[in-house]
Image (spheres, rainbow, N blue to C red):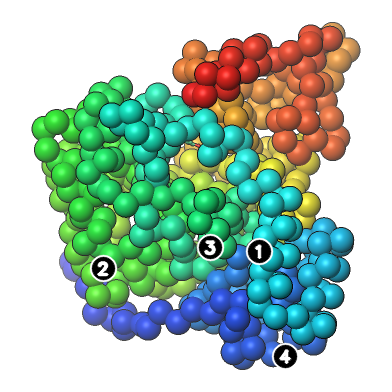
Amino acid sequence: MNSIVTFPNRIPTTEFEERRFKVYTDRQLDKIEVIQNLPEETLFEMKVVASVLPFRVNEYVINELINWDKVPNDPIYQLVFPQKGMLKDEHYERMAKLHREGADKKEIQAVAKEIRDELNPHPAGQMEMNMPELDGEVLDGVQHKYRETVLFFPAQGQTCHSYCTFCFRWAQFVGDKDLKMASTEAEKLHGYLQEHTEVTDLLVTGGDPMVMKTKNLVQYLEPLLQPEFDHIQTIRIGTKALTFWPYRFVTDKDADELIDLFAKLVDAGKHVAIMAHYNHWQEITTEIAEEAIRRIRATGAEIRAQGPLIKHVNDDADAWAKLWKKEVQLGIIPYYMFVERDTGAKNYFEVPLVEAFHIYREAMKKVSGLARTARGPSMSAGPGKVEIQGITEINGEKVFVLRFLQGRNPDWVQRPFFAKYSETATWLHELEPAFGEEKFFFEDEYEEMKKGNG
Ligand SMILES: *Cc1c(COP(=O)(O)O)cnc(C)c1O
Ligand code: SF4
């Protein structure tokens, strides 16, 4: 028997070479070589759509995640490259006309802004309702919607290594100042957390906080090791860097410091959870992606996976089953399957709730219990996170069975409720109460909360 035991977690990372981060935006579409083979019409469409919706892609994604033989149907291609159908015909035509006429940048930007304003840039009352205060002052960049969890949007993390075409945070990326939710000061965050001892979880999100330098992250997170933050048990970091730039955890200049930071937080008794955004198993097919996962897990941090169900990308039970299995194999815990939000290019990406549930159930059937930890399909709506638990018939009426996974009032959580069955509904506000009821049980209370502004 071979007596040499290898610990995969401890493979030295010298075998991976540092790589330069090279990114392309809408103004550099002409420089992306591989797409120059696509039909001219396709390139024009990309240009038109990218002048309205955010576009940004890096070389790693282009060269190593996309299977160009399958384009335009490749899921990662659909995930990052703009498609004509992402704009409504009228919006597309309006913008295409400007490009055909060679309109100047200013004109294009003005029309782009008008179109964006029609695309529900801030779904679920994100701007008005979740703004916490400290010393009578509204805290930018902090959201406190559910009692136990505070969301923090560090100012330096309001971009990503690539952009997802379906992203509901698109309004943050298009350079529109008043739409930005950002914070500059660690101090204010800490002040708020210190006062709110009911908070157990800090969720650092963006954009992608992993675009920040490690030293910035240290500034936000290390002070949480002080005793006055003992109530903060869990630090979650939402990121898609494990997909878009796994080098961040392996070979980037401050990758080792980042890994050290995770280890330090874990060693001091915090639960550190990397909330990895995954949509498709193809995102975890490279060695560097696996290495990044190994390095994070070796610190004692957990990786939990979540992501939306998106037409053209992952509206397929087999793809979800394969993703969940792969996650479990690599030690990642499947966490949420989301329903695509009602914003941006929703027309193109939306999947009816009926179909979402069907895909979820079919995928669940194909995996073992360890992969059945993914809850969903879940809608992050104004009143809370609402899960479709099933479709059934009660006293001859076909209904959706729903429940809150998270609620603006914690007492709503886990309470089943029923909506009339619908073939077409894609979001909570398109559902009606079942059994002839006028309102869902939470509606009156939620309306009161909205009036009270929180
Ligand atoms: C999902 C979410 C959270 C975290 O909820 P968990 O159920 O604890 O994962 C916190 N805040 C907001 C606004 C969210 O959407
Ligand atoms: S990585 Fe996340 S925040 Fe960034 S574009 Fe994709 S979905 Fe949006």
Looking at the rendered structure, the kind of residue marked 1 is: Leu
Residue 171 drawn at (x, y percent): 58, 54
Q: Secondary structure at mark 3?
A: loop
Camera-side mark, 4 or 3: 3
Q: Is mark 3 within 8 Å of ligand 2?
A: no
Name the residue tied to disc 4: 37
Binning the other alpha carbons within 10 Å of mark 3 as few (below 14), some (14 to 19) or many (20 upward) gives few
Q: Tell me the distance, in whole angstroms, between the alpha carbons under discs 1 and 3.
A: 11 Å
Residue 114 drawn at (x, y percent): 72, 58
Name the residue tied to disc 2: 255
Name the residue rendered at 46%, 48% in the picture: 181
The answer to the question of whether label 4 and label 2 lie on touching residues, with beta carbons closer than 8 A, is no
| Label whose residue precedes the other's in the sequence (4 or 1) | 4
Name the residue rendered at 79%, 76% in the picture: 98
The correct choice, above or below, for 195 with respect to 178 in the image is above
Residue 241 drawn at (x, y percent): 42, 63
The correct choice, above or below, for 315 with respect to 358 in the image is below
| Label whose residue precedes the other's in the sequence (3 or 2) | 3
Name the residue tied to disc 1: 53
Looking at the rendered structure, which numbered label has been put on residue 175? 3
| Label whose residue precedes the other's in the sequence (4 or 3) | 4
Q: Tell me the distance, in whole angstroms, between the alpha carbons under discs 2 and 1.
A: 31 Å
